[in-house]
Image: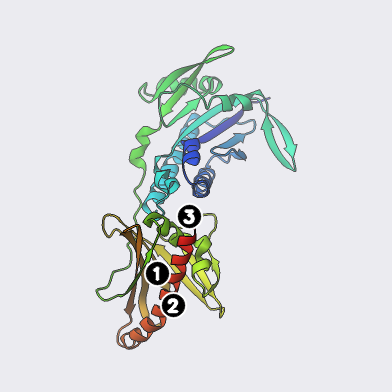
Amino acid sequence: MADSFLFIPDITGFTKFVNSTEIEHGQHIISELLEGIIESNQLDLVVSEVEGDAVLFYKHNTIPTFEELVSQSEKIFITFHEQLKQLEAHRICQCGACSSAINLSIKIVAHSGAIGFTKVLNHEKPYGADVVKIHTLLKNNVNEKEYVLLSDSLSETYKKELEQVSIAWVKPNSTPSSEGESQHHYFSLFPLFEHVREPVRPKPPERLPDPYVTSIYIERPKEHVFEVLINLDVRKLWNEEAKEVIYDEHKVNRVGASHQCVLNDNSVINFESFTDEIGEGKLIYGEKILGIKMAREVAVFFIVENESNGARLILELHIKPLPVIGWLIKSLMLYKMSGTLKDQLNSLKSLAERQ
C-alpha cells in the first residue's frame, strides 16, 4: 500500500485567545480563519475534520512533490495573515477577541504514512498510528513561532530536495520519542511576511459642517455603551421601528458589513457599517443609510466619549443632498428622521443601563 499524505495547519495562540477574550466573537473570528485555510487548498486535499483551531487534511495513497508542499504552505500562510490584517483594518469592535486577533499565528505539520478509514454517517475519516503521530508532532521543540514541520518519513521522501535547499531556510530538528530520536526538518515561514499585502481601509463618509446633532448621557462606561451600540443582535431592542434585522450572524460587525432593517410597515432600509478616527478617548461607530431618494449620501455617526460616572453618546446625522431639489427637501428629511433618532437614543440608554 502506498503512503498517504497528512497535513495540519494549526492556528496558534487559540487557547489563550478563547480563554481570555469574549468567546462568541472569538469563535466567529476563528471560524473565518479556518474557512480561509480550507479555501486555500490548492492541492485538492480532502478535509477530514476541523479540530477547533486546526484542520486535518489528507490525500490517500498520494504524496505531493516538495515544490507543491512548499507552495501550499506559502499560500495558507499568506492568506491567513492577509485575513488577520483585513480583520484589523476593518475592525470596529473594541472587545478583547477582536483587538487581539492580529496576534494569532499559524504553524503547519506534514507527515506521510499508512492510513485506514472508519465510516461515520457516510463520512469517511482516516485513522491509524500515523494519524495519531501527526497530532503528536504538533507539540515539538521547534524554536520558531510560525513554521512548516516535516515528519521523519516525509523528510526521507524529500531527502534529495532538502539537501539542495539553503541551510538557513530548512533545518533539522530532533524530537525525543519512545522509539528514540526522530529526525524531522522544518522551515520558518517568517520570511514570507514580505509577501503579505496590506489591506486598503475604506474611507468613512464625509463629515459635513452642518449636521443634525443630538446627544444623551448614559450611566455606563463608554466601552459598554459602544458594544451595545454595534451589536446587531440587540438592534431591535432599541430601534422600535424595526420588525426584523437581517445580517450575517456568523460574522462580527465591521467596516463594510451590511444589514437590513425591515420596518413595521414592511419597508426595508439598507445600512453599511463604518468607523473613523476622531480624537483620543472617543469611540465612533457609523452607518451609511443606502438608497435614500433625493440624497447622494446619508450617514449617522455615533460618537461615545467619557463623561462623569458614565458616557456621553453623541449622534450626528449627515445628509448630502442631490443638487437643487435635494436641498429643498433636506429640512423635511431632517425633521422626519430627527424625531426617530431621538427615540432610538432614549431606548438605547434604557437598554445599556439595564445590561
Mark 1 Cα-neighbour bin, 10 Å: few <14, some 14–19, many ≥20: many
Give the residue pinned by disc 1. Answer: 288
Residue at disc 2, secondary structure:
helix
Residue at 74 percent of width and 39 percent of height: 120
Q: Residue 273 appears in which quarter of the rendering?
A: bottom left
Residue 118 % position (x, y): 73, 34
**What's the amino acid at mark 3?**
Val
Residue 155 % position (x, y): 51, 21
**What's the amino acid at mark 2?**
Thr
Quick check: can you spot residue 68? yes
Q: CA distance from mark 3 to mark 1?
A: 17 Å
Quadrant housing the N terminus:
top right
Where residue 252 is drawn, which disc sits there? Answer: 3
Nearer the observer, disc 3 or disc 2? 2
Residue 300 as seen in the image, left or right of residue 123? left
**What's the amino acid at mark 1?**
Lys
Q: Residue 201 appears in which quarter of the rendering?
A: bottom left
